Amino acid sequence: MKKLENKVAVITGASKGIGAGIAKSLAAAGASVVVNYASAKAGADKVVEEIVSNGGKAIAVQGDVSKAADISRLFEETTKAFGAVDILVNNAGVYKFGAIEEISAEDFHNQFDTNVLGLLLTTQGALKSFNADGGSIINIGSVVSNIAPVGSSIYTATKGAVDAITHVLSKELGPKKIRVNSINPGMVETEGTHTAGFIGSDFQAETERTAPLGRIGQPEDIALVAVFLASEESRWLTGETLLAGGGVR
């Protein structure tokens, strides 16, 4: 029997990158997967198609995590398709780097609305759909909350908030048998890091030079940690922030 057999997982921002990798790995471990996306329908449909072609179960559901109405619809569709939720992965996130002189109120609200408010609203919505036996919430933070790179003041602030929320909710939701942990990736090669120009940059070279394991991450590196946190193998872990950056800290 697969370790996530008969489990239902919702992954936000799962049309590409880390979210897509997590969706595929949870499905491969036996979970029925809901691939949430905000605008990239084609990407989400591709992830679903790959999961189904490999014998898994998945659907794609559109929804902006910063909008309560969209979150309600996300979990209504989830329940209709698969039943109660066992696993929530709060992966949806955005980032924009820039010097303090360059940031704007729009930058602040865009990142905080998705990375922090979105996580809170999604968790709030999920609680109404969680299995009575509890389950696992996995937040996707970032190693930036430890290394605080130059030009990342807003983004690092959002991920520091994710760390804090993880610790608070682990205590708040423990009585409901819901574990809450965070995976904090380092630099990972995704569509987003290619688009942002990080891949092939001096930043990548410096990361690889200083990383004890000598490379940047791949989505599967993060997905394997997510499978562990979603499974009974991590049943005694809650409130933990797991750095997944090849030793970068």
Image: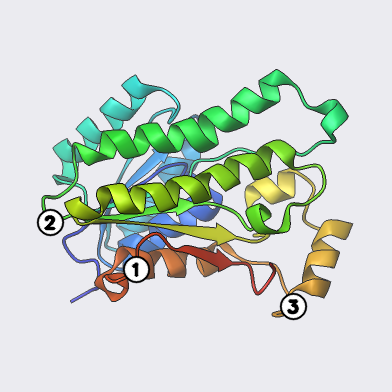
Q: Amino acid at mark 1?
A: Leu
Q: Residue at x 46, y 57 (%)?
A: 182
Residue count near mark 1 (Cα–Cα under 10 Å), binned few <14, some 14–19, many ≥20: some
Query: Residue 106, image x and y in percent?
Result: 68, 20
SS of the residue under disc 3: loop
- Please give the name of the residue rendered at 30% of the width and 68% of the height, measured from the top-left corner: 29
**Residue 79 vs residue 122: left or right?**
left
Residue that mark 2 sits on: 133
**Residue identifier under label 1:** 237
Q: In what quadrant of the picture does the N terminus appear?
A: bottom left
Q: Residue at x 78, y 52 (%)?
A: 149
Image quarter hosting the C terminus? bottom right
Q: Earlier in the sequence, mark 1 or mark 3?
A: 3
Q: Nearer the viewer, residue 57 or 67?
A: 67
Residue 165 seen in render: yes
Looking at the picture, which amino acid does disc 3 mark?
Answer: Gly
Is the residue marked by circle 3 packed among few (<14), some (14-19), or many (20+) residues within 10 Å? some
Return the mark for residue 194.
none
